[in-house]
Image (cartoon, grey):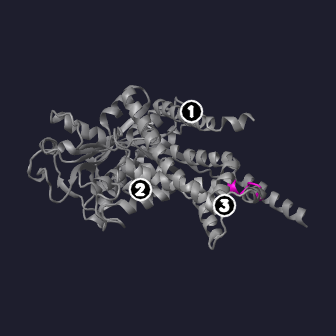
Amino acid sequence: MKTNGLLVSLFLVALLLAACGPAAPTETARLILATTTSTENSGLLAYLLPQFETQYNAIVEVIAVGTGQALQLGEDGNADVLLVHARDLEDAFMAGGHGLRREDVMYNDFVILGPANDPAGVADVATATEAFALISSSASPFISRGDDSGTHVKELEVWAAAGLQPAGDWYVSAGQGMGAVLTMADELTAYTLSDRSTYLARTLEGTDLQILFEGDPTLFNPYGVIAVNPGKNEAINSELANQFIDWLISVPTQELIASFGVEQFSQPLFIPDSEAWRNR
Amino acid sequence: MSGELAEIIALSLRVTGLALLISSLIGIPLGAIAGLKRFIGRRLLMALLYTGMGFPPVVIGLFVYLLLSRNGWLSFMPADVLPKLFTPSAMVLAQTIISLPLVAGFTAAAVLGVDPSLRLQVRALGASESQAAWAVLNEARMGVLVAVIAGFGSIISEVGAVMMVGGNIAGHTRLLTTAIVLETSKGNFDLALALGGVLLGLSFLANLAMLALQGKSLDE
């Protein structure tokens, strides 16, 4: 009897394998999306992607990493489409022939966070560079991402614009993601630069960090979507990548982006900014 | 990078070395007692040690984090008594807790594996109880060394806990493993791979050095 049971289960396994095989009538397409941790951590992708998946009978596999690694994944041909935020790096990626097509998607903005008592006094200044100069001159602790992420690149731009080379005990290069850096800044009562959405999501769990400075146009953070050049290898699904981009920048999807987070935080986390949206 | 790399290697060895020293000083006697002495709760102690050997390091990291956090479980203690979060001392504490059950558990197993008649014979020759225990430990020295090596291996290669309590701060708490995670996240796969090679080489050299302590037994 034992042998019979084994035979039956082997048969069932064989059936299961056959069902998964290429003979299946409607095959679900797979799209590998390499993106930054901010879109994943904020919950935006979990909010948007199911709609695309039903509409196109596809599964989107999200690899959430830093912008640097996301672009590297594209360069190595290990992803079909990229959703990233570091304009200069994106342009270099396109110039290198690694991408077929790049489109604006949306932007969010960066905010300067710090302890409520604001020892450096950054709440009263007009520009981000002045705020950074005050943090530096008062040697108040500042946590940097230090991981070549889009946020880190933006932070370095602000230091450069302020004509400063941050160094010293007060300047902590963490080499970690935004979530870990928020935890660290909270723990060490330090300043940091964060994207608004990750910070707002964190306020739900409780943090002592406050937004001390915001609204400077230099702190805007534009996201682009890039279709990886299918010439890299045969596995790259260029057709679906194009459909994904068309869907992402279409006005209905952009409306979804504009409404994301409004219920929870009474402010949108991302501002739609595709060409179709601007011309609507 | 080379100056920075030397700093990272030195810190990795210092943190792991210190943690291993502490866990050996506590773990070898603890394992010897668990393996030799009969007492109430001995079975429970062994079960706890063996469970601890498989405890996920990242959970220990979380535990140490919550202990040391500004609003943590020990926040009522004066601040200068405890190691601070995001310092090498916090990483030493986490690595000590990770390696202690391994050192103690393997030591206990090694001691249990020694022929019980050895102890009786030594005792019959007039040795005191602690002298007899020392004789058993000496007989089990190969197993005790393996215990220390297992402890070393578990923490030199560990990344989750030290990332959590150390913070991977450049020039302060960045270790080889956390540097590898960082370089991978930057897309610097070549550098990450090179760092992995350095880690592997270091681990090999450290194990060679530890085995040299037992060279005679191996050659016998």
Residue that numbered label 1 is attached to: B205
Q: What separation in Å lies between label 1 and label 3 (alpha carbons)?
A: 30 Å
Q: Image point 55% across, 45% down: which residue? A: B152
Q: Secondary structure at mark 1?
A: helix
Q: Chain of mark 3?
A: B
Residue furthest front in the image: B126
In what quadrant of the picture does the N terminus of chain B appear? Answer: top left
* Labels 2 and 1 positioned on one and the same chain: no
Q: Image point 46% across, 30% down: which residue? A: B191
Q: Residues within 10 Å of mark 3 (few under 14, many from 20)?
A: many
Q: Secondary structure at mark 3?
A: helix
- Mark 1 vs mark 3: in front: 3
Quadrant of the rendered structure where residue A44 is? Answer: bottom left
Q: Secondary structure at mark 2?
A: helix
Residue that numbered label 2 is attached to: A48
Q: What separation in Å lies between label 2 and label 1 (alpha carbons)?
A: 51 Å
* Labels 1 and 3 positioned on one and the same chain: yes
Of callouts 1 and 3, the N-terminal one: 3
Residue that numbered label 3 is attached to: B35
Q: What's drawn in magenta, residue-wise?
A: B110-116
Left/right of residue A58 with respect to residue A47 in the rendered view: right
Q: Is residue B8 magenta?
A: no
Q: Residues within 10 Å of mark 2 (few under 14, many from 20)?
A: some
Is residue A10 at all visible to an observer of this figure? yes
The kind of residue tagged 3 is: Gly
Q: Nearer the viewer, residue A121 or A232?
A: A121
The kind of residue tagged 1 is: Leu
Q: Chain of mark 2?
A: A
